[in-house]
Amino acid sequence: MADYKYISVDCTGPVTQITLDRPDQLNALSPAMALEIRDALALTPGTRCFLITGAGRAFCSGADLSGGDGDGGLSSGRAASDTLSLAYNPLIQEMAHCPVPIVTAVNGATAGIGVSLALASDFVVAGESAYFLQAFVNIGLVPDGGTSWVLPRLVGKARATEMMLLGERLPAAKAADWGMIYKCVADDALLAEAGALASRLANGPTMALGMMRENLLFALQADLSSALHKEAMNQWRAGDTADAREGITAFLQKRKAEFKGE
C-alpha cells in the first residue's frame, strides 16, 4: 500500500476504507489529494467495496482554493478549469466506473466538489449534523464535478436550481427526504451504519454488483432499446461467474448463498 500524505487507507478485509485526512483544512480537496484518492481506488487484491469518509469535523469542505498543499490554488479561471480537467473530473470518472460498490460516510460540512465526491458513490450515509452546500454562487463560480448532471437526476430541476442558485445549506435529514442520499443517521452511529452497509456489499456477488453499476450509469444516458441490449450482454457475463452458479445452487437448495466475488 502506498504511503499517502493527504488520505489514510485501511484495506483490512474485503472493505477498503479511504479517509480524507486534512482535518485542519476541513478536508478541502486539492489536486494532490484527488490524485491520491484515484490511486487508492486502484483495486488491491481482495477489495470488494470502498468506504470513503473524512477525518475530523467535515467530510470535505470543497476545493482547496488556497493552494495549501503546494498546488498553487485556483488563481484564475483557467487554473480552475485545468484543475477540473486534470484532477477532479478524472476522480469522479474513476468512481463512476469503479468495478466494486462505493459507500460514503458523510460527517459534518460537505460543500462544492465535496458534494460531487459524495454523490459519485452508490450509497451516501450522512450523520444528522452533516449538511450539503452548493457554495459556488457565494464566490462567483459555477457548480462542477458533475453536479449539474447528477443533482437534477436525483432531486429534480427545481430543487437542484434551489441548491445551486441560492447556495444554502441542505441538512442531511432533508437530503434523505429529497432522495438525494441513502440515509441520515445519528452522528455517533455513522461509521457503524456505513461500515455495516459496506460489509454487506463486500459480501455480495461482486462482479454482478459492478455490472449493476455499469448498467445504471449507461441507462441514464441511453434509450430503452440500448439499455435492454446492455442488460442482456451483462446478464451473459454475470451468468458465467462462479457467484451466479453459487447463487442459483443456494436458491435451489434453500440456503443462503456464500459469494466469493468471482
Image (tube, helix red, strand yellow):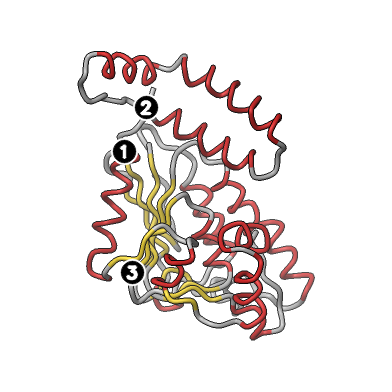
Q: Position of residue 155 (x, y in %)?
A: 57, 63
Q: Mark 1 points at which residue?
A: 14
Judged left or right of residue 148, residue 115 is: left
* 2 and 1 marks in contact (CB < 8 Å): yes
Q: Looking at this rendering, what residue extends furthest in the right direction? A: 78
Which amino acid, by three-letter code, is at mark 1?
Pro
Label 3: state its secondary structure: strand
Q: Mark 2 points at which residue?
A: 261
Q: In the image, which disc is placed on residue 78?
A: none
Kindly indicate the quadrant of the structure image that contains residue 217. Answer: top right
Label 1: state its secondary structure: loop
In terms of sequence position, does the residue under pointer 2 or pointer 3 come before the other? 3
Label 2: state its secondary structure: loop
Judged left or right of residue 199, residue 7 is: right
Q: Residue at x 31, y 17 (%)?
A: 246
Kindly indicate the quadrant of the structure image that contains residue 145. Answer: bottom right
Q: How far apart are marks 2 and 3 (CA)?
A: 30 Å
Q: Residue at x 53, y 21 (%)?
A: 235
In terms of sequence position, does the residue under pointer 1 or pointer 3 come before the other? 1
Judged left or right of residue 189, residue 106 is: right
Q: Name the residue under label 3.
A: 127
